[in-house]
Image (cartoon, grey):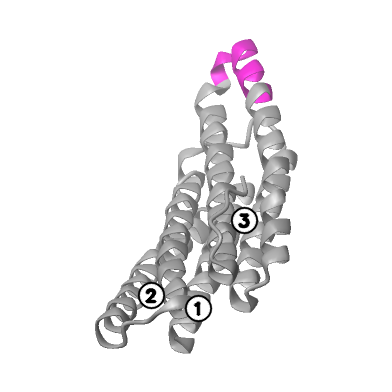
């Protein structure tokens, strides 16, 4: 069980790295960093596969009960959410190669979204490690901030596109970017919900 938990945390560290570097690459339009980030996806696949094998071995050989069984179930759900965060981060890392020139606007609010999502990811993993329900709930509450920023940037970009059709391609990439960030925050909420279930056996909706 301890090894299983450590495997999830190791996956979490890799996911945090990929997310952080994907955002750095898109903010700076750094294609080389984006390519380096994209190359990390197979490593995630190996970690995910190792966790799944461990889970099935535990179920087959030890028949875990009660809290141990909740750990196994939570591990599968958290791993799935982490994998989806990686998929979204990979989509983010593909954006620098699609934008020619500069961004259509400074990514101030977009970076705020990313910073909050990174905070949520970091603290959801800490909550999993320590089974800290209050930390999980506090991390999930920040999803509302991400949603508000998402809608504000969404409206701003649409208004800019309506005024200047020449920016539509570049602005569309930013619309995708903020959608990816909003979804990453949602998956962090899912992880927090899994932590609450792991610690209390209570199923809750936090977002």
Residue on which the image places disc 2: 47
Query: In this view, which residue lies farthest toward the top?
Result: 163
Task: Choose between 96 and 130: the one closer to the eye.
Answer: 130
Q: Nearer the viewer, mark 1 or mark 3?
A: 1
* CA–CA distance in space, label 3 to label 2: 24 Å
**Vertically, is 73 above or below 86?**
below
* CA–CA distance in space, label 1 to label 3: 21 Å
Residue beneath the point at 50% across and 59% down: 32
Residue 93 at least partly seen: yes
Residue on which the image places disc 3: 24
Q: Is residue 159 magenta?
A: yes
Q: Nearer the viewer, mark 3 or mark 2?
A: 2
Please tell me whether mark 3 sits on a helix, a strand or a loop.
helix
Label 1 packing within 10 angstroms: few (<14), some (14-19), many (20+): few
Could you say which quadrant of the image residue 105 lies in? top right
Q: Earlier in the sequence, mark 3 or mark 2?
A: 3
Picture coordinates of residue 122, whole percent (x, y): 64, 66
Residue beneath the point at 66% across and 16% down: 159
Q: Are marks 2 and 1 in contact (CB under 8 Å)?
A: yes
Residue on which the image places disc 1: 10
Could you say which quadrant of the image residue 41 lies in? bottom left
Label 2 packing within 10 angstroms: few (<14), some (14-19), many (20+): some
Task: Choose between 97 and 202: the one closer to the eye.
Answer: 202
The N terminus lies in quadrant: bottom left
**Vertically, is 59 above or below 199?**
below
Task: Choose between 143 and 13: the one closer to the eye.
Answer: 143
Please give the range of residues in magenta.
156-166
Residue 30 at least partly seen: no
């Amino acid at each position: 069980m301890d090894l299983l938990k450590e495997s999830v945390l190791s996956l979490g560290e890799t996911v945090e790295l990929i997310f952080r570097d994907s955002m750095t690459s898109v903010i700076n339009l750094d294609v080389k960093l984006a390519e380096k980030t994209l190359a990390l996806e197979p490593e995630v696949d190996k970690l995910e596969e190792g966790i799944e094998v461990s889970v099935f071995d535990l179920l087959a050989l030890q028949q875990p009960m009660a809290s141990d069984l909740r750990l196994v179930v939570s591990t599968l759900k958290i791993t799935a959410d982490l994998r989806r965060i990686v998929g979204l981060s990979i989509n983010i890392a593909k954006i620098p190669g699609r934008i020619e020139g500069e961004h259509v606007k400074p990514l101030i609010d977009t970076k705020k979204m990313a910073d909050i999502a990174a905070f949520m990811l970091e603290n959801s993993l800490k909550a999993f490690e320590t089974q800290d329900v209050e930390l999980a709930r506090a991390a999930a509450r920040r999803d509302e901030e991400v949603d508000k920023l998402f809608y504000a940037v969404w409206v701003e970009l649409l208004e800019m596109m309506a005024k200047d059709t020449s920016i539509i391609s570049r602005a569309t990439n930013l619309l995708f970017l903020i959608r990816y960030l909003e979804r990453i925050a949602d998956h962090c909420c899912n992880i927090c919900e899994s932590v609450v279930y792991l610690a209390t056996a209570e199923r809750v909706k936090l977002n």
